[in-house]
Image: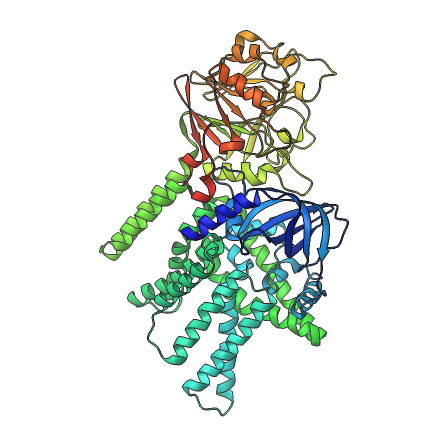
Amino acid sequence: MSGHALTYQESIFAADQLNNDAILSIQEIKPLSHIDAIELRASVASLNPQMIVKLRWYRPNRQLLVGDNLVAEVATKPPNELANVGGFSYRRYLLSENIVATGSLKSVSKINRQQPTVAPISRFRQSIADKLSRFTRGDVLSALVIGDRSSLSKSVRQIFIDTGTAHLMAISGLHIGMVYGFTLLAFSCLTRLLPLPRSHQAQLISSAGAFAIAFCYAAISGFALPTIRALVFLALWLVVKACRWHVSGWRLLWFTAAVFITVAPQTAYSVSFWLSFSAVAGVFLALKVADSLQLNGAKKLATMQLVIVIMLMPVQVSFFNQQSLLAPLVNLFAIPWLGIGILPLALIGALASVVWPLAGNAMLMIADWQLQLMVEVLMPVANWQGQLIHMDSASLTLAIVGLVTVLSSRLVFKRWFALLAIVAILVIVASVYRHWRVAPTVDVLDVGQGLSVVSRYRGNTVIYDVGASYPSGFNMADAVINPYLTHQGIHHIDWLVLSHDDNDHAGSANKLSDKVRVNQLLASFVPDKLPANFDGALHQCHGQFNSLKRWFSGGISLQNLTSDVGQRASDNDLSCVVKMTMDGASLLLPGDISRAVEGRLNQQLLDAGLLIVPHHGSKTSSSIQFIKAVAPQMAVFSAGYRNRWHLPNEHVVQRYHALDVATYSTSDVGMGRFIAKGDQWQATSFCQLSWPTWYRCYDLAID
């Protein structure tokens, strides 16, 4: 593992030096429908052959095919992510795929093309995809049959996530096991009907036939990594069975894991790796628990399901920050329903539709009807937020310690459940009160080239700006703010301030989760798209009526310091300038105002211990007079990593340092948390807030 990590970091440095005349070998091409571009993955002649670069080519003027070798001009950046608590780790994803750089392909000067060939399996997969797309739940059918989840709608995907059944929509060892088990059962029934001897050899032949069918299913699904893991484990188990070796399932599981980590170390950073092996370990442990308690029938099945969910909970919470309380019950009927009633029909129907369309389409229609029914059954469960527990690392640690205590104790049966109930109550209480802040807390989120600041004190929350939204559908609310709010246990926003009508500040306003209520809105404009769960009043920060007006929200005071700049002012200069005060600590949020507007502000009211630097540190803002008037202890630059405007401006940063102001930049260290003690602010970086894994924190340091 350490050797792979060293190779990966060395390759990152080498890939960062790529520019002209890079020799690429294309391994994968994906068209981007929302823009005129293609995304490709390629190995580079000058890098380790196992390492990959991920590039986009905008407005391509030549056709590229998988297998092409080309000489090209590229612009690359090291792996980077929006570093926020509760957010998706893009760096971990890139590491799990051996991707050492992302960027763009500028131009292609030479292409060396072999005779293009299309694998028969690719043509077959495409023909099945075309047939499945005609059905109502063709998106889910495609995910189950050919492993294509790209067409899954956001709403359907969220339903499966919130009910703890998302693993059913990603072809994995569970699906391979279902196909193998169903086929083996069919072969066993067939051998009983035929006059064949029931010998050990006959059982092996049936097992081999079932394995062959499972292998074909994996091939149709595109040989995704989880299916390969399942096939390797299944093949090893068949070899052990054929040779009549006495090897426990645990040893076989650890051996399979060791093989994968040795051959492909990057798989250890994959979410699916931990979900797959935790699920199988859960099955083994569940069987042992059920046997030790001498359970049978429904009790055995329910106990096994509970143990499997408990085994998966640490992984589920670590990666998704939530756990469905109804997941054991939902999976208790969803897994058999999928394995017996849906998946066999979907697979057989998809295959039969190629040679016998009438029969194949009939089976697919029945499978499609069942999937639609499953979605309708799961929808009310997903909409009931009471069944979801949002947990952070502290709640997870408490739960694990409690469960280990319970499982390792030798208490009688009733006390066992009493202690388990106490642990559950403690976890629920800890998760509910995570949003409560004893000291004033300001979180400057990493939203790239944009701004979003969350201020909290006791049970009150104020958000200033929400970051950008892009034509592709990617937006900072879904990527950063909503996961952050969920992770922190925040269910309502007392005040939402939209400084001005620029995409990088207000673009994601209508993407805020409808599960979070917004009480009051302050803006410099009339938003055409409001948050889904906004039911309060809209206040304007311009005009004499609200000039210098102060609002109170619990222990947070908001004072409007916005000056009158006239009708012809730019959007930046129209920014709402807000000063927040929390228990004696103050914070100034000036938006994107320029030096001209800085001079018009009431200089007597600007003093603040914490300053969000205007306009991301642009040279058009942060005059010496303004900095002296504010006299901050600390100044925060919110800017994107290697942004094209080169913000924050170097001279502006030096200006703050010359006045003995400590600086912090989200482009360097990710999200920053600032906690007030009296009138003094203390900074905590993202890597101090989260587990400091090497791939997320090796290049982050406070200025």
Please determine whether, in this image, residue 214 is positioned above or below residue 644: below
Q: Is residue 556 left or right of residue 347?
A: left
Q: Where, by quadrant of the figure, is residue 215 drawn? A: bottom right
Q: Is residue 296 left or right of residue 491?
A: left
Furthest residue in direction top, as rendered:
604
Q: x and y percent of residue 661 in the render? A: 47, 17
Q: Where, by quadrant of the figure, is residue 496 drawn? A: top right
Residue at figure coordinates x 53%, y 10% from the top left = 629
Q: Is residue 541 left or right of residue 181?
A: right
Furthest residue in direction bottom, as rendered:
195
Q: x and y percent of residue 543 in the render? A: 66, 13
Residue 575 vs residue 543, the one in the foreground = 575
Q: x and y percent of residue 442 in the render? A: 47, 26
Instruction: Answer whether residue 341 is visible to the viewer in this image.
Output: yes
Q: Is residue 179 left or right of residue 363?
A: left
Residue at figure coordinates x 42%, y 76% from the top left = 239
Q: x and y percent of residue 617 in the render? A: 58, 23
Residue 64 vs residue 538, the one in the foreground = 64
Residue at figure coordinates x 71%, y 13% from the top left = 566
Residue 110 vs residue 199, the one in the foreground = 110
Please determine whether, in this image, residue 77 is positioned above or below residue 575: below
